[in-house]
Amino acid sequence: MKNPPATGQSISRIEGPLKVTGAAKYSGEYNVPGLLYGYVVNSTITKGKIIKIYTEEIKALPGVIDVFSHENRPSTAWFDMKYADMDAPPGSPFRPLHDAEIRYNGQPIALIVAETFELARYAASIISVDYEKEIFDTDLRSHFGDGREPETGMASLLKPPPPEPTGYFETAYAAAKYKASGEFYHGTEHHNPMELFTTTTLYEGKGKLSIYDKTQGTVNCQLYVANVFGLRFKDVKVISPFVGGAFGSGLRPQYQLFLSVMAALELKRHVRVTLDRSQMFTFGHRPPTLQRTRFAADADGMVTALNHTAFAETSRFEDYTEVVVNWSPKLYPAAHTLLDYKLVPLDVFSPMDMRAPGGSTGMHAIESTLDELAYQLKMDPLDLRLKNYTMIDITVNLPYSSKELKECYLKGAEKFGWANRAPEPRSMKRGHKLVGYGMATGIWDAMQAPARAEAAMTRDGKLHVKSAVTDIGTGTFTVMTQIAADELGLPVADVIFSYGDSKLPFAPIQGGSMTTSTVGTAIRAAGKALRKKLLRVAKRMKDSPLGKAELEEVIFQNGYIILKDNPQAAVSFADIINDGHHGLPLKTTNTGVPNMAKLNKYSRAAHSAVFVEVEVDEELGVINVTRALTAVAAGKIINPKTSRSQILGSMVWGISKALREETILDNQLGKYMNQNLGEYHIPVHADIHDLDVMFIEENDEHINELGIKGLGEIGLVGVAPAITNAIFHATGKRLNQLPVHFDMLL
Amino acid sequence: MNSELDLKPAAVFTSKTRQITLNINGISRGLEVLPYVTLLDALREYLDLTGTKKGCDHGQCGACTVICDDKRILSCLSLAVAKDGAEITTIEGVSTGNDLHPLQQAFIDHDAFQCGYCTPGQICSAIGMLSEGKAKTRADVKELMSGNLCRCGANMSIIDAIMEVKDGGGHE
Ligand code: FES
Ligand code: FES
């Protein structure tokens, strides 16, 4: 009997029982005898120099093992590029404890290593430091209009600069009858995964290290550590089977990794360094961004002109960029476009990719402006989007490989009850509360990178698949197991997927919604190679019923190779290994690469339509997202259950982005003021109401063999603008700042 | 980090360890700790019970929730020495034998987590919340669970899972 394919099924997370019983171990939970604890000391000034760190007094305290600072740190690589990682933007990567110079507030300046966590923490709290302060600038808002072109580099491959202008924007805009424009501010955000950033480095002797790190890239960290400390790659093992959330914060090796490894090598001991919650505001963040839009349409509602300009913060040492302004012509093919993206270097740490980087910032401005345009045109916002619907991406002049956004709009609108919306702002009420409906579009590039995977069949008939990839909560473990199961026609229970370890076959960093397509394609390549090998060995077996069958003439089903023409002729995988291969596993390692020749003929993106209902209490200004629905078209959905959770999680992030989270920078001090979860607000259970997810069927034959586009970001991009559009519909007030504050409505 | 602190280092470095007993998941465990070690660190660092999580160390996230003498508490805000003799249930002791607690099963069934880092705290908190008996409606449950943050945004599924157990009477 044929078992149904594993892909497409709602399977519960395979690691679920470990997570609900506390058995899942995260990077700070590997306890070994003799473990030392490191605590980081951070700069309290924003810019200047360290004159003196009073380390001797601290070293003298009982229980303190050592204090490391720029004055006594062991020498590491001096060449800048050695510190570059797979996600490093153009520039010069930050080097912890490199010299006396202070580049940003909260910069790590010393590591205290002690026998216990408590002693290390206490010592860090009393160490004295003399500084020489310099004048600094952290205020993006004072720089509207004076940015500069970003440097380009490797990172630009995945983050293309804005397309060249087309047509004559200024003339077209000036002449247009229907226009909408806006100025937008998106505040700083910090990822704040629930797990604290921790590295436990086990010193295994002779320069060998086993490192348990909180990361989105085991190989990325392995290369970084080996390069920086001059170790052999094979002596450095980075292990991260469970990652307590990351959202981009683990794409680059963070300073606790450097410090933990440095101390372990120097002291020849096991060392754990855990950052506290406030220290999680001292590396990487979503950059604050200022934007200006001017959109125009003709009387029929065809968008004719698009201008979108952004000024984004970066650090003084790296040009971190995002794709903020490129999206509008991809969705609304206007003849006249003018898109510009500039950077403003300030005295902060380099910003870092945070869930839907750039897209979620830019789409807020784009979709809010489009909403405004709909009101100018007296058109339903949904109709305006349908009117301008395109199957061609005019920024590259290529058709979309697939695009079921229209179905997202239509099916989403129907299920949400969009037709019940009264067009006028302030026209819907529930009790004494104003009610508003808003909608917005989401778009995110579908990307793929090369990766490797190993597949092996063992004598018990089980398939073992391996990849260095992490599972940051995305469901990667489960989804990869499903993909592998289908390759050999096995039930999921017969597949063992090993992951989260740098010694396994190469996987790139887990980000940009490309993990499933990237690692999935590698697993497919390995699965295909293993099928060939199994058949070859099966045919060589004595009296093999498979005769001279070619791959096309057999099926792999339920642990057997079966002749298509004669289902009685079958050999079990277990027999192939035991009788045909001396009981030894049959193994293969293969590379999955994107088929660029094919892909270059298409523009590739996932899409979404988001519908939101808000209630606004006019007297108190309280805004409540009472209902929200996201319809997603993202190619094939491997596991609807975990995929739904991905989109639900993104929707909560969207609510947070629109109404809650913001890191507040005091420009007098150059310091983030709310570095804790009491003051950095994220939604709590009481804030989250009725959320709905629809997956729209989308068959993409071009994108990759699996037809996958990725889901990590698409759920977020459209949510915040749908909320602010709903607030406009409820109140008649257009609020262009994220997050929206209650008082702006009063 | 703060050179103006008026604390004498000596006090911290010379204080004496205390012998305490914690009854954890039905097992009595003797422990020698300094007076300023939190219950959370005692569990994680001294007893290798790492199922209880640290998300903030400041009482702001709920990840460290355990059940202590039948009440849900934040173990990061409790000193281990103050809990000498207490009965403590951590996530490792929530289920009996090989069977998962109904809430644990409901969390799996509803996919009420992604990264899983807030999960032990959510489950312990839900057990405590249900036995308090104050929550009547879904809105009550949301309110009374709001001390437990989830950055992955599994909020709705977490409440779905708890409601299933609450309404299904799966909780004794
Ligand atoms: S760790 Fe105790 S509340 Fe966050
Ligand atoms: S599941 Fe990741 S924080 Fe809740």
Image (cartoon, coloured by chain):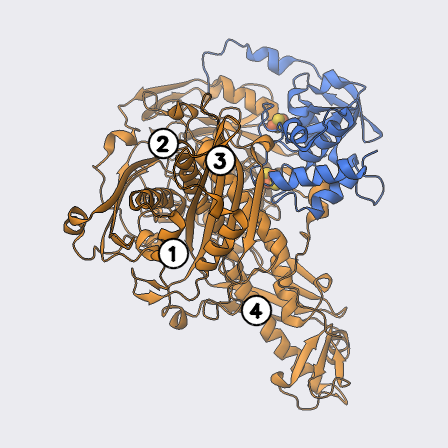
Amino acid at the residue labelled 1: Leu
Q: CA distance from mark 3 to mark 2?
A: 13 Å
Query: Which percent across, then down, holds residue A723?
Result: 44, 39
Q: Which residue is mark 2?
A: A733
Relative to A556, is A265 above or below? Answer: above
Residue at image location 70% in from the left, 90% down from the top = A547
Q: Earlier in the sequence, mark 2 or mark 1?
A: 1
Q: Which residue is mark 4?
A: A524
Mark 1 — on which chain does it sit?
Answer: A
Mark 1 and mark 3 residues within 8 Å of each other at the beta carbon? no
Q: Earlier in the sequence, mark 2 or mark 4?
A: 4
Amino acid at the residue labelled 4: Arg
Q: Earlier in the sequence, mark 3 or mark 4?
A: 4
Mark 1 and mark 4 residues within 8 Å of each other at the beta carbon? no
Same-subunit check for callouts 2 and 1: yes
Instruction: Find ligand 1 in the image and state its quadrant.
Output: top right
Amino acid at the residue labelled 2: Lys
**Closer to the eye: label 1 or 4:** 1
Picture quadrant of residue B47: top right
Q: CA distance from mark 2 to mark 4?
A: 51 Å
The crowding category of the residue bearing disc 2, from other C-alpha atoms within 10 Å (few below 14, some 14 to 19, many at least 20), is some
Q: CA distance from mark 1 to mark 3?
A: 23 Å
User: Which disc number belongs to residue A302?
Assistant: none
For the question of whether residue A231 can be seen, the reply is no
Query: Which percent across, then down, holds residue A708?
Result: 51, 62
> What is the secondary structure assignment of the residue under circle 1?
helix
Q: Which residue is mark 1?
A: A386
Tell me if A289 is positioned left or right of A579 in this view: left
Q: Earlier in the sequence, mark 1 or mark 4?
A: 1
Chain letter, colour orange in render: A
